[in-house]
Amino acid sequence: MRRAIFMLLTVLLAVTVAAPAAFADNVHFIKASASGPNAAGNVSVTFKIAGLGANESITVTATADATAVYACRNRGRNFPSDPKKQTLSGPVSASGDFQSGQNGQVSGSLTLSPPASTLDCPSGQTAVLVSVSYTNAQVSAGGDTEDLGDFQRTFFTI
């Protein structure tokens, strides 16, 4: 009898330990896309995720490699013949925490922004974004990653 009770408790313990793994969430993107850059040079990343439990929190992160070119422009909205310029390159990212609904899904958006300028323009001139490009854009959450592609926009020809 003791042996039967011991075996029953052992099986019950094994099922209790294994149950969370058996019912683990299967987080995955239903859709993910990006658009832009917009007039400010930002790329908007939108997504819909499924496979969460009801009312669960998840962190979503969008990333890309960005290159931004800035130049000094005068008050007449022209660029000098040899404008002062700055090119900035590096990784950019945006993250957010989102809460699933009763259906275990999350919809949302994140914004990737170009690297900020530190260009110091002469008096009477201001730094403007000339062009921006994003490569290897991705969005990830819960171990799943979606590739979004490359995006670029030229605002001024100098």
Image: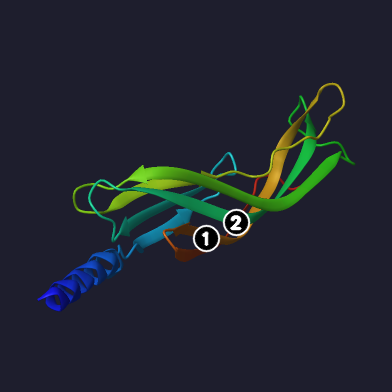
User: Residue at image x 87%, y 26%?
Assistant: 122
What residue occupies the far right of the structure in this picture?
Answer: 82
Of the numbered discs in the image, which one, if any, rests on residue 138? 1
User: Residue at image x 84%, y 29%?
Assistant: 121
For badge 2, the amino acid type reads Ala
Residue 10 relative to residue 144: left or right:
left
The residue singled out by tag 2 in the image is 64
User: Residue at image x 75%, y 41%?
Assistant: 70
**Image height check: is 10 above or below 122?**
below
Q: Secondary structure at mark 2?
A: strand
Q: Along the polypeptide, which appears first: circle 2 or circle 1? A: 2
**At which x and y percent is residue 106?**
31, 50
Of the numbered discs in the image, which one, if any, rests on residue 128? none
Q: Is residue 58 visible?
A: yes
Q: CA distance from mark 2 to mark 1?
A: 6 Å
Residue 112 relative to residue 5: left or right:
right
**At which x and y percent is residue 41?**
60, 44
What residue occupies the far top of the structure in this picture?
Answer: 123
For badge 1, the amino acid type reads Gln
Q: Secondary structure at mark 1?
A: strand
